[in-house]
Amino acid sequence: MIVDEFYRIGADAIHEHDFNRSFTVTSVVPSWSGPVVQWRPIKGKRLAPDPEFDHLRPAAVLDALARTLAHRWASGRPLCPLDWKQRLTSGMPQLFPFEPEVGNGWIWLIASAANHLSAVNTCNDMRTHDLKDKYGTLRWDIASVEFHQEVEEYTSCVDRLSGYICEDCGAPGAIQSLRGWDRCVCSRHAVPSIR
Ligand SMILES: [Zn+2]
């Protein structure tokens, strides 16, 4: 399951066709934060990213996805605590001064990013300025006294990945538009179109 999710979400998020991927999964290794998908580029397959189209490094997007899925599959199957938003605000009140207004399926995306950024940054001045769903994807703005390139890139990766992760359950998804309202949903949570 975790490998299948990595391939599906990963290929979509870096804009590749699933049948012609530039990366392959080599193993899944246990870690304190959950099972981590290890991947490597396939020789000769990697295309130079078009800076006009895609400013994000594909490797950064895939690494963020590996962290997200480790968190999602940490207990053997995806579990979403009902009070996850309160846990974020009480556990990291500086970073989350308010509860995010997003669906439960993005818990692993947000929580793993928060853990990662808190661990790798010596700064403790990060504060979420905005965290919401807009046009079907997550928009996360973190304000800080100093500019942190890593925070900027990581939140962009999170925003990108959210367009391919169901906002309701965290499974691979796609943005669906219904009556002008865009949401990223999996096939199980897609609303049948009204004819
Ligand atoms: Zn779903």
Image (tube, rainbow, N blue to C red):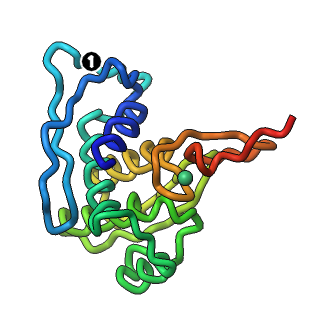
Categorize mark 1 by other alpha carbons within 10 Å: few (<14), some (14-19), many (20+). Answer: few
All told, the count of numbered labels is: 1
As drawn, is 115 to the left or to the right of 189? left
Q: Residue at x 20, y 57 (%)?
A: 35
Find numbered disc 1 in the image and state the secondary structure of the residue it sits on. Answer: loop
Q: Amino acid at mark 1?
A: Ala
- Residue 89, position as x, y percentages in the image: 44, 81
| Residue 67 on image: x %, y % | 26, 55
Quarter of the figure with residue 168: bottom right
Q: On screen, 135 above or below 133?
A: above
* Frontmost residue, 31 versus 90: 31
Q: Quadrant of residue 180?
A: top right
At which x and y percent is residue 24?
Answer: 20, 30
Horizontal side of 161 relative to 33 (left or right) equals right
Residue position for label 1: 48
Q: Nearer the viewer, residue 5 or 148?
A: 5
Residue found farthest to the top: 44
Q: Residue at x 25, y 62 (%)?
A: 116
The residue shown at (49%, 66%) is: 129
**Residue 113 appears in the picture as rendered:** no
Quarter of the image containing the C terminus?
A: top right
Q: Is residue 121 above or below residue 27?
A: below
Left or right, residue 105 beside residue 37: right
**Quadrant housing residue 9:** top left
